[in-house]
Image (cartoon, rainbow, N blue to C red):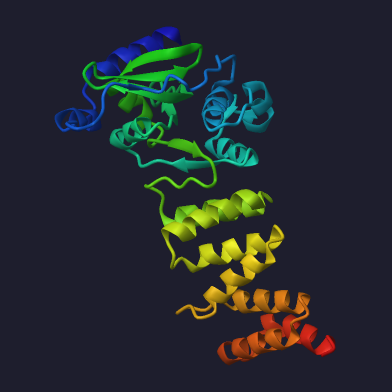
Amino acid sequence: MRLLCVLAALLLAACAAPQTRALMESHAGRPSPVELTSVPFFPQTEHQCGPSALATVLGDSGIAVNPEALTPQVYLPGREGSLAIELIAATRRYERVAWRIPPTISAALAEIASGKPVLFLQNRSFAFAPLWHYAVLVGYDLERREVILRSGPLAREIMSLDTFEHTWARSDYWAVVVTKPDELPDFVSENEAMQQGLALEKGQHLNSAHQLYARMVQRWPDDDPARFGLANTAYALGYGASAEAQWRQLLDSPKPLLPVFYNLGQYLLEQGRRSEAKAILQRARTLWPVDRRLDPLENDLQNQRP
């Protein structure tokens, strides 16, 4: 297998990769060289490339955890490795978010230039005999046409850009950056951010979800689902007045959401503000006259004495 890997590397290095070629033709203005020397390093032991790579990017984000603690969470003995979905789920358990970057060399180097290490998956062998490996990109040097990796037992593995692209391409350019929940990378779409927020909520990471929704509302003020998530997590965290303010802002949305009226009505009832809750229900009934989802609020209003 060692001979196969060496042969594969030689063949890969022999042919120029298209993204690398385009990058080298138009890299004016891009800072180079760049190396994130403060990114931690965890030498990989057997079957630990996933846990080691994840510990590296989590450590850079401020979470001190070693690969041994991560191995039971992400390592699948039957596959003798880790799946990307397990790495992402483990990231959430530590109140962090893993964002998949655009599938380009340029995007990966841009993250390095901005100070973010990139966890990526590569196939270091042939397609018919894959050797999957997680590593962390921490630097590059365009003059030398090289990248710098935290990989396996090496704190500074030097690899040619062409080989990096070829081996990375075989994973469909799978790579992520890990951030705190109140950080929102420029390349992230509203839909992707919403999916991450919902996943955090589902995992009961309410404070993290709340922070992410707040950043989403800041970037996309007209994103009603994000504002609704912000209101709901505020309520769950005990910030009732803040939740009410967000729900009320959604009442006049061009595309009103029934759960907004329901949640606000129930909150007002909890606060003993029955007349206000009744007014909210009446507004809701003009929009959804026969929707049964409003029945519990209507029943609660009838059962609560004026």
Q: Quadrant of residue 28?
A: top left
Image height of 304 relative to 129, above or below: below
Residue at the left extreme, as displayed: 25
Residue at the front extreme, as displayed: 241
Give coordinates of residue 192: x percent, y percent.
46, 53
Q: Residue at x 37, y 47 (%)?
A: 187
Give coordinates of residue 148: x percent, y percent.
37, 19
Residue at the top extreme, as displayed: 3
Q: Quadrant of the C terminus?
A: bottom right
Query: Going by the image, does 186 lie left or right of 293?
Result: left
Query: Going by the image, does 112 lie left or right of 213?
Result: left
Residue placed most toward the observer, 228 or 85: 228
Residue placed most toward the observer, 18 or 36: 36
Residue placed most toward the observer, 189 or 134: 189
Say whether residue 8 is visible.
no
Q: Residue at x 47, y 18 (%)?
A: 151
Image height of 203 relative to 33, above or below: below
Query: Going by the image, does 12 lie left or right of 49?
Result: left
